[in-house]
Amino acid sequence: MKQQQYIQKAYQYHVMADYYKYANPQKHLDYYIKHFYYLNRAIQSPSRLQWRENSQLQFLNAAPETELIDIYVNNRPVVQRLAFGKLSKTLAVPYGNYYIDIYPSGDSTTSIFSKKITIKSGNYLIGATGMNKKLQLLPYDLQVKTAKNEASVRFLHLSPDAPAIDVTVPHGDIVFPDLSYKELSEPLAITPMTLNFILKVAGSKNHIFSLPKFKTNPQKSYTIILIGCIQHHELPSFKIVILEK
C-alpha cells in the first residue's frame, strides 16, 4: 500500500471515530485505533510525501463564530492558532489530493470540519467560512498573470450574513455587479493607481461599506475579501482583508 492510500485510510477512520465519539464510545475507540495504525504506517512509509514547490496554498479564517483554529493537512499540523480575519503563511505543496482538518486550537481530538481538496497548478486560498456551526472550506485559485505595466483586482465575498453586493466607485459606476456569498469575481486589469471602492446592496443605492483607499503596484494582483457580519452584532463586524500576490 502506498503512502497516499495509508493517509486516505487514516482519514476515513478518523471521520468514523468522530462520528461515534458520543453515540458509541466503544466504536469510537475501535475506529480511533485503526486511524492511529494507518497514520503511523503513512509516516513510516518509504514513499513518504516530499513537499516540493509546485503550487502555493494559503488559509484564511473567515468563520466569524470560530476562535483560534489549528489546521492539519494529511494529518500533519501546518497552521496553528489562526484567528478570525487572519491569513496563514503560504505553503509550497505538490499537486494532488489533500485531507484537511480544522480543530479548535490546542485540541486535536475532535475536528470542527474535514474535507478532501484537490490541488492543481495554481495559487490557492482555502477559506474557512460559514455560520451556525455549518463550517465550510472553500478553495479558490487566485493565480493571475498580469502585464508588465498593469495590476489586477478582484473581490471575494465571504461574509455569511451579507446580501449580494455591487462594488462601485465613488461616482456611482458599478465595477463588480451582484457579487453573492462565496463568489469570486473575475480579475479586472487596471493601470496601477490608488483605488477607492464602495459596497452597496446589489441593485440598490443602499450603502454597506466604504473601503479605505489603497495603492496598487505593477505586476501585482489584489484580492479584496469581504468577511465578518452585518446583521449579527454579537459577532465580528464586517471588514475586508486584502491579499496581494
Image (tube, grey):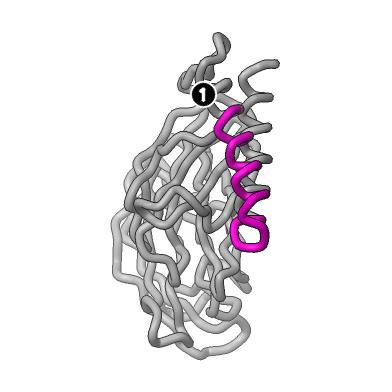
Q: How many marks?
A: 1
Which quadrant of the rendered structure holds the N terminus?
A: top right
Asked whether residue 34 is drawn in magenta, I would say yes
From the viewer's side, name the closer residue of 210 and 54: 54
Please tell me which residue is depicted at 55% across the width and 33% down the height of the picture: 36
From the viewer's side, name the closer residue of 127 and 206: 127
Q: Position of residue 164 (x, y in %)?
A: 60, 77
Which quadrant of the rendered structure holds the C terminus?
A: top left
From the viewer's side, name the closer residue of 36 and 66: 36
Q: Is residue 146 visible?
A: no
Residue topped by disc 1? 54
- The range drawn in magenta is 20-37
Please tell me which residue is depicted at 45% across the width and 87% down the height of the picture: 207
- Secondary structure mainly formed by the magenta segment: helix
Please tell me which residue is depicted at 62% across the width and 50% down the height of the picture: 28
Outermost residue toward the top in this view: 46
> What's the residue type where badge 1 is placed?
Asn
Location of residue 53 with respect to 97 vertically, above or below: above
Q: Position of residue 96 (x, y in %)?
A: 63, 28
Q: Position of residue 25 (x, y in %)?
A: 61, 55
From the viewer's side, name the closer residue of 127 and 109: 109
Q: Is residue 128 left or right of residue 192?
A: right
Location of residue 184 with respect to 134 vertically, above or below: above
